[in-house]
């Protein structure tokens, strides 16, 4: 049976953990981002450590190093998603193009990160636009 292990780390441990996992031949399964109950950003780096999943979690950081040079697209795609949706900055990540959000969203919304906009605000904006 597969076991999920959650391991808290600091942002200074992100790159060394990724390098160790790559050296051991471990796959980067995914990088997830979410906001916890205290309102802090949590990044979860999940690696396949057969037969288990080890999740290395960083809490409360808005700027972290990219592991794109270690895990290529397996890392850069979720890093870009998390950047767009939560505003987390991944140092060394090429953000010259957006993945999902329109290029003008920064000008029209002011933030460009839809996950930090309360749902009630998005619904209200949608209602106003539908009436026009």
Image (cartoon, grey):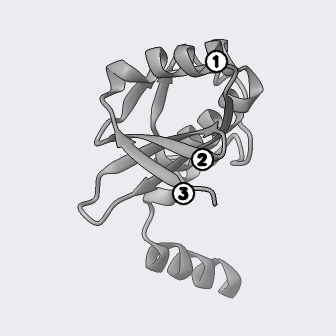
* Residue lying at 63% horizontally and 35% vertically, measured from the top left: 80
Q: Which residue is mark 3?
A: 114
The residue positioned farthest toward the left in the image shown: 38
Q: Nearer the viewer, residue 103 or 96?
A: 96
Q: Viewed as shown, does residue 97 lie left or right of 14?
A: right
Quarter of the image with the C terminus in it: bottom right
The residue that appears at 51% across and 81% down in the rendered structure is 124
Q: CA distance from mark 1 to mark 3?
A: 32 Å
Count the numbered circles shown.
3
**In front of the other: label 2 or label 3?**
2
Asked if labels 3 and 2 touch by Cβ distance under 8 angstroms, the answer is: no
> From mark 2 to mark 3, how far is it between C-alphas?
33 Å
Q: Which SS class for mark 2?
A: strand
Q: CA distance from mark 1 to mark 2?
A: 16 Å
Q: Nearest the camera: 53 or 50?
A: 50
Spot occupied by residue 127 in the image (x, y as percentages of width and height) = 60, 85
Q: Which residue is mark 1?
A: 22
Kind of element beneath mark 3: helix
Q: Nearer the viewer, mark 1 or mark 2?
A: 2
Q: Front-most of 37 and 55?
A: 55
Q: What crowding class fits label 2: few (fewer than 14 Cα within 10 Å), some (14-19), or many (20 or more)?
A: few
Can you name the residue that lies furthest to the front here? 1
Please tell me which of labels 1 and 3 falls first in the chain: 1
- Vertically, is 28 above or below 24? below
Q: Is residue 106 visible?
A: no
Contact, mark 1 vs mark 2 (Cβ under 8 Å): no
Residue placed at 23% from the left, 61% from the top? 38
Q: Which mark is residue 52?
A: 2
């Amino acid at each position: 049976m597969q076991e999920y292990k959650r391991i808290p780390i600091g942002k200074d441990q992100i790159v060394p953990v990724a390098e160790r996992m790559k050296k051991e031949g471990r796959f980067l399964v995914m990088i997830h981002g979410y906001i916890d109950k205290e309102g802090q950003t949590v990044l979860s780096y999940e690696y396949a450590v057969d037969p288990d999943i080890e999740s290395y979690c960083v809490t409360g950081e808005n700027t972290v190093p990219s592991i794109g040079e270690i895990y290529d697209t397996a890392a850069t795609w979720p890093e870009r998603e998390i950047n767009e949706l939560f505003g987390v900055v991944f140092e060394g990540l090429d953000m010259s193009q957006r993945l999902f959000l329109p290029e003008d969203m920064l000008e029209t919304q002011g933030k460009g990160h839809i996950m930090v906009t309360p749902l009630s605000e998005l619904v209200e904006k949608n209602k106003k636009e539908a009436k026009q």
